[in-house]
Image: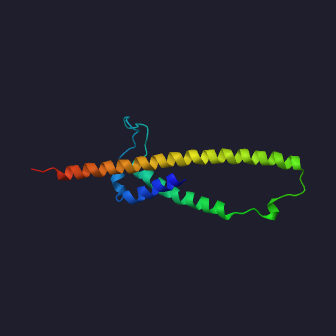
Amino acid sequence: MEQYFSATQKMEQEVMFPSLLRGVFPQQEGAAPDAESHTDLYERYQLLKAIKPMVEKGLASVSDQSPTGADTDMDTSSDSNEAGDAQLEERLSHHLSGLQQVLTHLTRDTNALTRRYSQILEQINLSEGQPSW
């Protein structure tokens, strides 16, 4: 989670001119550009920026919730509670695993976008340093 927030914060600090990402398509490390990708880095940037508040809000709403007495049923048997608890643990584990995979993917995309933006700026700086006779 911290890596994701760190990556998005770095992206927001470094990408000062998102319009430079228009028409630039993502590349895999050491591979040719993905011909099937129709989403340029500008669209991905917008998506990553839109997702961040949703993740933050989702985490805040989860931490704000606390179990109430109405949520617990004291009339059920001990065996039933243990089976239900095991099922809840399994479901929670499944969802946390999925969340971890999504956050890892988002972090990787955010870092790649930030690196590519830095490369674009370097190319611009190099071309400005060339004399134009």
Direction top: furthest residue: 31
Residue 35 horizontal/vertical position (percent): 40, 36
Left or right, 130 with reference to 10: left
Observer-nearest residue: 54 or 73? Answer: 73
Residue 76 horizontal side relative to residue 110, left or right? right
Q: Nearer the viewer, residue 120 or 75?
A: 75
Using the rendered image of the protein, determine whether residue 22 is visible from the camera's viewpoint. no
The residue shown at (39%, 60%) is: 13
Q: How is the image coloured?
A: rainbow
Q: How many marks?
A: 0
Residue 3, position in %: x, y? Answer: 50, 52
Please tell me which residue is depicted at 19% across the width and 53% down the height of the picture: 128
**Residue drawn at point x = 37 percent, y = 35 percent:** 30
The answer to whether residue 52 is above or below residue 91 is below
User: Residue 124: in sight, yes or no?
Assistant: yes
- Residue extending farthest to the left is 133
The x, y position of residue 129, in whole percent, is 18, 52
Q: Residue at x 64, y 48 (%)?
A: 96
Compared to residue 118, the image places residue 29 above or below, namely above
Q: Nearer the viewer, residue 88 or 2?
A: 2
32 to the left or right of 56: left
The location of residue 23, given as percent across then percent down, is 35, 47
